[in-house]
């Protein structure tokens, strides 16, 4: 009888393990085109799908407001969040960062009305500035501007700019250009130089911490073998004017 029970347990495990293994991890991001799209064909979408697939792990990518995306990953409602600055584990203790960066973000100011060069966050203090709620680097460095508008998502942010509600909006260089094109804003430009450049990372809930080292090794290999550069070539150039390609890899 005991042997029969053991055999039955082994058979059940053999039947259920493949089903469990095929359950996709759910990652969320606040990023939009050309970095991430509803069809999961954006620059970061394709990098992460390829990286996880090399480990035979399926993923799905959803889109949430910046703060909610972090909270869902921290609570374990979803499995991870990207693309984020280092150090968030201090505020979100259930998140663990992948050591290999996904990208470098240039944080830049977009404007339609101002004609000035900026060399620090303080240069924006006299102005009405818009940011997306949940972007910690922006919340911390722009708290003292004349008027700070915090909005739910990037579409609302660039609507502030389009409707002259904000003189400046601060956002990531790559995605900002995608939004200008998507929203038909043709008279905006980037103020130079960038306010900051930061490495940006994937975070996973701590229950998946064992995946981070192999993922980092895979991503590093993808950079070395040209996969990341090829994905960039296929997804990014159409969103950038020829005279402003500094954010391209």
Image (cartoon, rainbow, N blue to C red):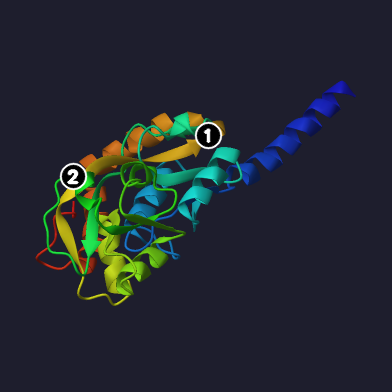
Cα gap from disc 1 to disc 2, whole angstroms: 38 Å
Q: In this rendering, is residue 160 above or below 86? A: below
For label 2, the SS is loop
Out of 48 and 65, give the one closest to the viewer: 65
Out of 191 and 84, give the one closest to the viewer: 191
Q: In this rendering, is residue 240 above or below 220? A: below
Q: Quadrant of residue 219?
A: top left
Out of 140 and 87, give the one closest to the viewer: 140
Q: Residues within 10 Å of mark 1 (few under 14, many from 20)?
A: some
Q: Residue at x 43, y 55 (%)?
A: 30
Residue 127 in view, yes or no: yes
Q: Earlier in the sequence, mark 1 or mark 2?
A: 2
Q: Name the residue furthest left.
A: 243
Q: Quadrant of the N terminus?
A: top right
Q: Residue at x 25, y 64 (%)?
A: 177
Q: In this rendering, is residue 246 above or below 80? A: below
Q: Residue at x 9, y 65 (%)?
A: 243
Q: Residues within 10 Å of mark 2 (few under 14, many from 20)?
A: few
Q: Residue at x 41, y 46 (%)?
A: 82
Residue 11 got which mark?
Answer: none
For label 1, the SS is helix
Out of 76 and 136, give the one closest to the viewer: 136
Where residue 62 appears, x then y in whole percent? 50, 56
Residue 58 in view, yes or no: no
Where residue 81 appears, x then y in whole percent? 46, 45
Q: Quadrant of residue 203?
A: top left
Where residue 190 appears, x then y in whole percent? 18, 61
Q: Name the residue furthest top.
A: 2
Of circles 1 and 2, the one toward us is 2
Residue 208 got which mark?
Answer: 1
Q: Which residue matches tag 2? A: 120
């Amino acid at each position: 009888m005991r042997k029969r029970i053991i055999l039955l347990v082994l058979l059940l495990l053999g039947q259920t393990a493949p089903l469990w293994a095929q359950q996709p991890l759910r990652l969320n991001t606040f990023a939009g085109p050309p970095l991430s799209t509803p069809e999961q064909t954006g620059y970061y979408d394709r990098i992460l799908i390829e990286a996880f697939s090399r480990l035979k792990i399926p993923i799905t990518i959803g889109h949430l407001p910046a703060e909610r995306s972090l909270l869902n990953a921290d609570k374990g409602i979803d499995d991870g969040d990207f693309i984020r600055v280092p150090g968030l584990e201090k505020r979100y203790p259930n998140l663990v960062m992948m050591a290999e960066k996904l990208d470098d973000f240039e944080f830049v100011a977009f404007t339609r009305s101002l004609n000035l060069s900026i060399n620090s966050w303080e240069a924006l203090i006299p102005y009405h500035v818009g940011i997306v709620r949940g972007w910690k680097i922006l919340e911390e460095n722009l708290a003292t501007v004349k008027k700070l508008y915090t909005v739910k998502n990037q579409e609302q942010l660039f609507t502030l700019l389009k409707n002259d509600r904000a003189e400046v909006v601060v956002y990531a260089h790559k995605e900002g250009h995608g939004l200008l094109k998507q929203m038909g804003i043709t008279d905006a430009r980037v103020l130079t130089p960038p306010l900051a450049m930061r490495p940006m990372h994937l975070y996973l809930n701590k229950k998946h911490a064992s995946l981070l080292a192999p993922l980092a090794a895979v991503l590093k290999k993808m950079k070395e073998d040209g996969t990341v550069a090829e994905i960039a070539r296929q997804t990014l150039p159409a969103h950038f004017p020829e005279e402003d390609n500094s954010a391209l890899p």
